[in-house]
């Protein structure tokens, strides 16, 4: 089996927040890599995916690609399963045959949200019929990656935000400039995660040859309402924010009421947890200030 520190790397989802950060880190390290966006390859096309991997024969595959529009997944279940469930399984199968390592990004949505303490890596997921279409598709991806039998690292994360993609922070900032008041749910609790910090965590774990499932998120927890309040406070925007319940803001897809991830294993593997999310938020806002034209538009989601 080839080492993760040598050979060529293939990134899928290189147009997204995490994929961009990973490509930049590989560039910084001088590591040869191929960074593929959806326009370069539809990972839902199994034959094309297998051909691409067979031609490049990477020693490390980083899959940051996913169909993350949670509500759209309810109407496009087959597509969600193909991208989030089947494609990672194909990558894992090829990786196992090549002796390569696969890094796959999982989600807090595999849990039902009834927990009362942070979810650990070994905690069982919710029953299939309790999950949203998105959560079920992500869980299927986890199952297929594990079943392939190759070397893998599954990073389970939550509430990702950062430059270069649609995210909650930018949505709140945009909404605050066009609405007299915002209303945000206050009965869903989790951990926001800054994409550049998630990228740094990914490579820290690879450098330590970690395998299996590892929860990765910024430390500290909050509700979406508390997140929104802090976003506007740090941005110096006075638009009022009112809390509401999930029932008052119905959406097509189920959201876990409690999806706080336990971060002890990551801290044990790397020596320390990621910084608290308010510090990461400040870093994101600084990036926006330095390059406001690159922030783009966004939509809520996890």
Image (tube, rainbow, N blue to C red):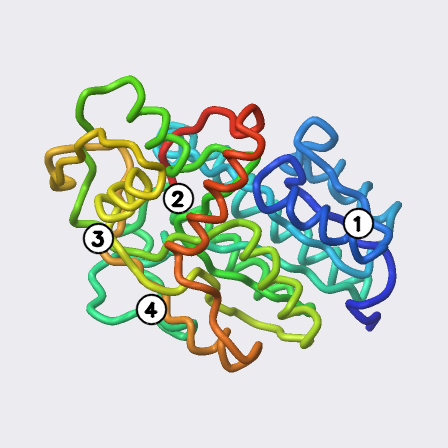
Label 1 to label 3: alpha-carbon separation: 39 Å
Q: Helix or strand or loop: what does disc 1 sit on?
A: helix
Crowdedness near tag 4: few (<14), some (14–19) or many (≥20) residues, C-alpha within 10 Å: many
Residue 261 horizontal side relative to residue 244, left or right: right
Q: How many marks?
A: 4
Q: Earlier in the sequence, mark 1 or mark 2?
A: 1
Quarter of the image with the N terminus is bottom right
Eye-nearest disc, 1 or 4: 1
Seen at 26% across and 51% down, the residue is 256
Q: Earlier in the sequence, mark 1 or mark 3?
A: 1
Q: Earlier in the sequence, mark 1 or mark 4?
A: 1
Seen at 68% across and 60% down, the residue is 102
Eye-nearest disc, 1 or 3: 1
Q: Earlier in the sequence, mark 4 or mark 2?
A: 4
Crowdedness near tag 3: few (<14), some (14–19) or many (≥20) residues, C-alpha within 10 Å: some
Which circle marks residue 257 in the picture?
3
Mark 1 sits on what residue? 27
Label 2 to label 3: alpha-carbon separation: 13 Å
Q: Would you identify the image quadrant in which residue 251 lies? A: top left
Mark 2 sits on what residue? 302
Between 127 and 24, the one lying in front of the other is 24
- Residue 192, given in percent of the width and then of the height, sits at 38, 52
Q: Helix or strand or loop: what does disc 2 sit on?
A: loop
């Amino acid at each position: 089996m080839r080492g993760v520190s040598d050979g060529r790397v293939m990134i899928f989802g290189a147009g997204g927040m995490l994929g961009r950060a990973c490509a930049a880190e590989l560039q910084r390290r001088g590591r040869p890599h191929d960074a593929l966006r959806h326009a370069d390859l539809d990972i839902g096309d199994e034959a094309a995916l297998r051909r691409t991997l067979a031609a490049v024969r990477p020693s490390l595959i980083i899959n940051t690609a996913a169909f993350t529009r949670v509500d759209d997944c309810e109407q496009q279940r087959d597509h969600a399963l193909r991208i989030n469930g089947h494609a990672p399984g194909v990558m894992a199968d090829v990786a196992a045959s090549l002796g390569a390592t696969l890094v796959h990004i999982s989600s807090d949505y595999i849990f039902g949200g009834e927990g009362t303490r942070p979810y650990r890596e070994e905690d069982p997921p919710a029953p299939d019929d309790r999950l949203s279409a998105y959560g079920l598709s992500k869980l299927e991806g986890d199952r297929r990656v594990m079943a392939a039998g190759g070397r893998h690292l599954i990073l389970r994360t939550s509430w990702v935000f950062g430059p270069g993609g649609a995210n909650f922070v930018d949505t709140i900032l945009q909404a605050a400039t066009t609405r007299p008041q915002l209303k945000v749910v206050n009965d869903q609790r989790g951990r926001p995660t800054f994409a550049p910090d998630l990228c740094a965590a990914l490579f820290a774990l690879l450098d330590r040859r970690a395998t299996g499932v590892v929860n990765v998120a910024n430390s500290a927890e909050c509700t979406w309402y508390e997140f929104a309040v802090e976003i506007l406070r740090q941005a110096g925007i006075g638009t009022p924010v009112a809390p509401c319940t999930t029932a008052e803001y119905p959406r097509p897809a189920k959201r876990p009421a409690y999806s706080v991830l336990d971060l002890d294993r990551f801290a044990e593997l790397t020596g320390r947890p990621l910084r608290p999310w308010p510090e990461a938020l400040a870093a994101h806002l600084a990036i926006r200030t330095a390059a406001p034209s690159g922030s783009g538009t966004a939509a809520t989601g996890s």
